[in-house]
Amino acid sequence: MTTSHTSDANGAGATDAPDAPDARDTTDAAVRAELSRLRDSIDNIDAAVVHMLAERFKCTQQVGHLKANHHLPPADPARESRQIARLRELAESAKLDPAFAEKLLNFIIAEVIRHHETIAKSS
Ligand SMILES: O=C(O)C(=O)C[C@]1(C(=O)O)C=C[C@@H](O)C=C1
C-alpha cells in the first residue's frame, strides 16, 4: 500500500507522504508472515492426518477381510460405543469439542463399514 490513509486501526497513516511506506504496510507484512507460518503448520498437520488415515484404512481393510473370511458382520456397534466413549474423553482432555470428535469417528467408521460390505460381497 503506497497511498496515505486518513485513519486505520493503529491510528497510523494520516500523516504519511503519499508514496512512503506507512504503518499499515508494516502490519500487513507482519500479518501475512504470521498467516503464512500458521498455514505451513496447518499443511503439515493436514498431511499427517492424511497419512494417519491411510494407515488406519490399511488396518481396517485387513479387518474387513478377516470378518468376511469368518462370516462376521461388517459393523460391531458395541465396539463403536466403546470407541466413541474413549474418543470423547480424549477430546475433552485435549480441549477438542467431544461432539465433533464423535461425528468425525462416526464419519470414518461409516466409510469403513462400506468397505467391509464391499469386501464381504466380493468374497
Ligand atoms: O473393529 C472392528 O470390528 C472394525 O470393523 C473397525 C471399525 C473401525 O473403523 O474402528 C469399523 C466398524 C465397526 O463397526 C467397528 C470398528
Image: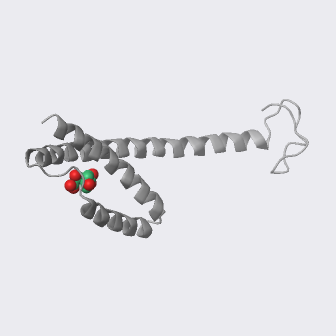
Question: Residue at left 27%, top 47%?
Answer: 113
Residue 25 in which image quadrant: top right
8 sits to left or right of 77: right
Nearer the observer, 65 or 16? 65
Residue 3 position (above or below residue 58): above
Q: Position of residue 59 (x, y in %)?
A: 20, 47
Question: Residue at left 70%, top 41%?
Answer: 28
Q: How many numbered discs?
A: 0
Residue placed furthest toward the left: 70
Residue 61 position (above or below residue 77): above
- Give the image's coloring scheme: one colour
Q: Position of residue 98 (x, y in %)?
A: 45, 64
Nearer the observer, 40 or 21? 40
Q: Position of residue 84 (x, y in %)?
A: 34, 63
Question: Residue at left 28%, top 46%?
Answer: 112
Q: Quadrant of the N terminus?
A: top right
Q: Position of residue 74 (x, y in %)?
A: 21, 49
Q: Quadrant of the C terminus?
A: top left
